[in-house]
Image: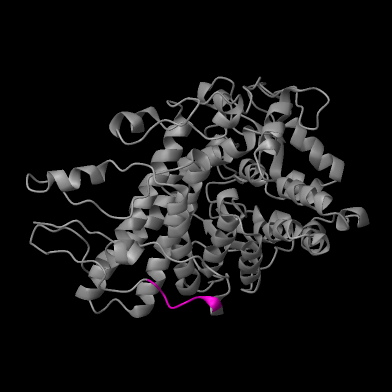
């Protein structure tokens, strides 16, 4: 009979990092032969290097397969819950509910942004929970492959845990693969299929250990393949982790960003380079740019994505799926922010005007569209260098180094021919924090950041609530007369509701307050 694969030794809680510098890390805490499983002929767990490599491939394939739904819903939610976008299609109740802060537990956004990351976590666990068994059984798995493949899986699991934490608060943390239920093991195994939420401190300690290992052992940056989790993504993810309010440590954000900055990434020469594409039947969108740290990309038009149809046109088949209203429609408030800066380069790369058959937010003969998903081979930038530079600037501003923060922001602004920040901004920590937040809005619009940046800003959710609520208040900086009437963003509606189906199927999961 199979035994439960407890991973206390492999995935137990570790001591906090003292730094994000490689030379400060202790010896790796993960080691082979930590999983003891009684083998029998019915045991279907992975045992060979070939099987493990197939599971790694499946983990990545899921990112550009079903995970596409999470990508486009995340992009929409992060911008249209605040001030960057309208939901777009007033005929889609689920999108109107996101914009108006009326999401309920049966809304497709709440359901998909729970279930899809949970499946991604399971994909990663198939590697994490079986790699020691494979190492013991198959000597063809090299030590380098062991360390790198495990690191890639740990990073992908960490990314999804952090995403779910920001969206739902405390979440289940699956760290093992439950065996099949039999009459002999039902009392022991049954609860493993219905895990409850775990405290934030448990998540914190687990991620410290996992990201420490990945920063040390993940593959080095490969300039020819950015569709691969590497040290740059591991360190960048650690920086984002330490910037979040429950885990906040600005010194560690700073050191992790510095590590990424030393790995050879650069800003693209032009902002447009990130979104460009070549023409023709064999055309391709920009991929593997020097700015990309981790992207999800598609190899060719014949096996490309379908995300574009949610936002605008596929440039290679411009009339395909263009007979219904699109999501994540750029707001007039965002357009005004671009214009106030004279930021035509980023505005033109982010927003495209075209004629269409609907007029929900703009005249149908000159309608605004989100323009960062231009083709069916345009990549999803999960992390890029400008994001890290601005996160580093945010850390420096919060460490009272306004001048150092301004230097990094100016690097990003120079790329799009904007003037350097003022002497007044460089001399004020508070003005510098505002400048970083503003720069992130313009630089990262429609890439799934705005909501989370506002969540992170300050010591409470006051700025997030202010921006969301003031969209309906004339005279405020966030006002936009085309934004749907919003329910007030109180403490009970910052997080999403847990899907009804999850609560119905798992008696150990309770609903978030307010729903």
Q: Residue at x 55, y 19 (%)?
A: 91
* Residue 236 in sight: yes
* Residue lying furthest right: 423
Relative to 311, 104 lies left or right: left
Relative to 67, 125 lies left or right: left
Vertical order, 497 against 290 (above or below):
above
* Residue 365 in sight: no
The quadrant holding residue 10 is bottom left
Q: Where is residue 104 drawn, in percent x and y? A: 48, 25
The quadrant holding residue 56 is bottom left
Q: Where is residue 377 drawn, in percent x and y? A: 53, 51
Colour mapping: one colour
How many labels sit on residues? 0
Q: Where is residue 268 drawn, in percent x and y? A: 70, 63
Relative to 380, 2 lies left or right: left
Q: Residue at x 56, y 50 (%)?
A: 246
The magenta stretch spans which residues? 24-29
Vertical order, 448 against 469 (above or below):
below
Magenta-drawn stretch contains 340:
no
Quarter of the picture containing the N terminus is bottom left
Magenta-drawn stretch contains 25:
yes
Q: Residue at x 54, y 71 (%)?
A: 221
Which residue is at the front of the view, 198 or 118? 198
Q: Where is residue 288 drawn, in percent x and y? A: 57, 63
Which residue is at the front of the view, 14 or 176? 14
Q: Residue at x 61, y 73 (%)?
A: 263
């Amino acid at each position: 009979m199979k035994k439960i694969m407890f991973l206390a030794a492999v995935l137990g809680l570790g001591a906090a990092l003292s730094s994000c510098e490689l030379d400060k890390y202790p010896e790796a805490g993960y080691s082979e032969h930590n999983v003891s499983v009684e083998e029998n002929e019915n045991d279907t767990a992975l045992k060979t290097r070939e099987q493990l490599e197939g599971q790694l491939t499946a983990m990545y394939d899921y990112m550009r397969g079903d995970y596409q739904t999470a990508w486009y819903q995340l992009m929409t939610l992060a911008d249209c819950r605040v001030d960057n976008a309208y939901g777009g299609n007033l005929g889609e109740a689920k999108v109107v509910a996101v914009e108006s802060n009326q999401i309920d537990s049966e809304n497709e956004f709440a359901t998909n942004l729970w279930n899809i990351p949970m499946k991604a976590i399971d994909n990663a666990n198939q590697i994490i929970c079986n790699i020691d068994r494979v190492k013991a059984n198959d000597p063809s798995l090299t030590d380098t492959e062991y360390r790198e493949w495990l690191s890639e899986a740990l990073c992908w699991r960490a990314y999804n845990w952090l995403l779910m934490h920001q969206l739902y608060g405390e979440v289940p943390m699956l760290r093992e693969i439950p065996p099949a239920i039999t009459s002999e093991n039902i009392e022991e195994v049954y609860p493993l299929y219905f895990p409850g939420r775990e405290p934030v401190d448990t998540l914190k300690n687990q991620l410290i250990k996992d990201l420490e290992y990945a920063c040390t052992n993940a593959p080095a940056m490969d300039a020819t393949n950015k569709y691969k989790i590497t040290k740059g993504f591991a360190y960048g993810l650690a920086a984002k982790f330490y910037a979040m309010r429950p885990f906040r440590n600005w010194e560690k954000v700073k050191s992790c960003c510095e590590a990424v900055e030393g790995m050879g990434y650069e800003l693209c020469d032009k902002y447009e380079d990130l979104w460009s594409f070549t023409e023709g039947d064999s055309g391709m969108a920009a991929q593997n740019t020097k700015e990309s740290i981790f992207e999800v990309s598609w190899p060719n038009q014949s096996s490309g994505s379908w995300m574009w149809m949610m936002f605008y046109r596929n440039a290679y088949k411009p009339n395909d799926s263009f007979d219904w209203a699109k999501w994540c429609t750029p707001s007039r408030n965002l357009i005004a922010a671009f214009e106030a800066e004279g930021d035509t380069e980023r505005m033109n790369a982010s927003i495209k005007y075209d004629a269409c058959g609907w007029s929900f937010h703009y005249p149908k003969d000159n309608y605004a569209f989100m323009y960062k998903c231009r083709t069916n081979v345009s990549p999803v930038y999960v992390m890029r260098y400008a994001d890290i530079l601005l996160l580093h600037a945010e850390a420096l501003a919060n460490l009272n180094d306004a001048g150092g923060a301004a230097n990094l922001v100016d690097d990003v602004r120079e790329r799009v021919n904007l003037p350097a920040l003022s002497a007044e901004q460089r001399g004020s920590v508070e003005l510098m924090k505002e400048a970083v937040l503003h720069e992130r809005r313009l630089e990262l619009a429609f890439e799934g950041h705005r909501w989370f940046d506002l969540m992170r800003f300050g010591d409470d959710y006051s700025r997030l609530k202010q921006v969301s609520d003031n969209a309906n208040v004339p005279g405020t900086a966030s006002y936009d007369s085309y934004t749907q009437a919003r329910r007030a963003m109180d403490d009970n509606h910052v997080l999403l509701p847990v899907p009804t189906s999850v609560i119905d199927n798992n008696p150990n999961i309770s609903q978030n307050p307010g729903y």
